[in-house]
Image: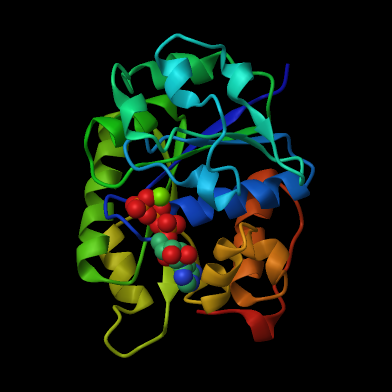
């Protein structure tokens, strides 16, 4: 039996980089030698499987949540060794699915993996709540934009309400433009919680995504990749230093 860390990736606002982070952070943890599973907890608009290049896996999390198949039947191992449980992109598969079963489904895997990362749905509805309830710890992600920060703040309040551990926030797609809220402003808004890091806006992320590979493999020495790897190293208890000339803030 190993100690399994179950980490939900939540944001409140959609389109800020949850799925990209889940795929890349999972890959980085796997590269650090950690037995890692990524799960698509975004049941209505899933795209983790698309990011990972397996959009049409024949059985999915939806089948598990309907009690049709076992969780191991839908666990796919990517060429990197990273494990993934995709959700179905077929609208018809949504019928009869109850997100409430996500937690008990994943509990069966406790003790067998080092990390389970759950990609959350946008918003703060039933789906994202099921991800929150299934997780022991949460990483929040936002972009440097007041509305996204406000939504993240609401997610953090929910994390506190459900007595989960908030590991901290990641500020994604940073362009260092004058109109973006500065680090001090962001820290004031997010209160006492930690900032795990800032990831720059980098077109290579989209390029890698189009090729169905993680940015950390496509451009391993880009600032975005180095930042993601340093966050993974912290989670995995590994030594990893970003050279000073590659740091963002
Ligand atoms: N650091 C980055 N630089 C540039 N583009 C990025 C970066 N991070 C993510 N993106 C792009 O932003 C878009 C949204 O990312 P992603 O799908 O990961 O967001 P999401 O929060 O999961 O969205 P949703 O809420 O719809 O599930 C994608 O096209 C992705 O390639
Ligand atoms: Mg997503």
Eyeballing the image, is 127 above or below 202?
above
Image quarter of residue 221: bottom right
Q: Which residue is painted at 47% across and 51% down in the image?
A: 19
Tell which of 48 and 167 is nearer to you. Answer: 48
Q: Is residue 193 visible?
A: no
Q: Which residue is painted at 72% across and 22% down in the image?
A: 2
Image quarter of residue 174: bottom left
Left or right? Give the position of 167 relative to 228: left
Which corner quadrant holds the N terminus?
top right
Residue farthest toward the bottom in the current orientation of the protein: 178
Tell which of 182 and 58 is nearer to you. Answer: 58
Tell which of 83 and 227 is nearer to you. Answer: 83
Left or right? Give the position of 179 relative to 169: left
Q: Can residue 21 be seen in this view?
A: yes
Tell which of 247 and 14 is nearer to you. Answer: 14
Q: Which residue is painted at 30% across and 32% down in the image?
A: 127
Image quarter of residue 120: top left
Q: Where is residue 31 in the image (x, y as percent from the top left)?
A: 76, 49
Q: Position of residue 128 (x, y in %)?
A: 31, 36
Q: Where is residue 164 in the image (x, y as percent from the top left)?
A: 39, 32
Q: Position of residue 139 (x, y in %)?
A: 45, 47
Q: Which residue is painted at 77% across and 44% down in the image?
A: 79
Eyeballing the image, is 2 above or below 165?
above
């Amino acid at each position: 039996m190993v100690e399994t860390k179950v980490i939900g990736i939540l944001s409140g606002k959609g389109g800020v980089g949850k799925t990209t982070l889940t795929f890349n952070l999972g890959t980085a943890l796997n590269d650090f030698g950690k037995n890692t599973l990524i799960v698509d907890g975004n049941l209505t608009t899933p795209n983790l499987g698309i990011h990972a290049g397996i959009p049409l896996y024949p059985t999915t999390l939806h089948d598990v949540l309907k009690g049709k198949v076992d969780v191991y039947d839908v666990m796919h191992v990517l060429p990197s060794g990273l494990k993934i449980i995709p959700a179905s992109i077929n609208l018809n598969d949504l019928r009869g699915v109850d997100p409430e079963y996500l937690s008990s489904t994943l509990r069966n895997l406790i003790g067998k993996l080092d990390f389970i990362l759950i990609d959350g749905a946008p918003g703060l509805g039933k789906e994202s709540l099921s991800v929150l309830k299934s997780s022991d710890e949460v990483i929040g992600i936002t972009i440097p934009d007041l509305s996204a920060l406000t939504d993240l703040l609401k997610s953090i309040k929910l994390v506190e309400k459900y007595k989960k551990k908030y590991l901290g926030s990641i500020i994604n797609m940073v362009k260092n433009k004058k109109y973006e809220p500065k680090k001090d402003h962001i820290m004031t808004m997010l209160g006492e919680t930690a900032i795990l890091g800032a990831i720059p806006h980098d077109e290579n992320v989209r390029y890698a995504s189009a090729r169905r590979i993680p940015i950390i493999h496509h451009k391993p020495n880009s600032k975005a990749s180095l930042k993601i790897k340093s966050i993974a190293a912290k989670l995995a208890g590994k030594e990893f230093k970003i050279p000073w000339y590659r740091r963002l803030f």
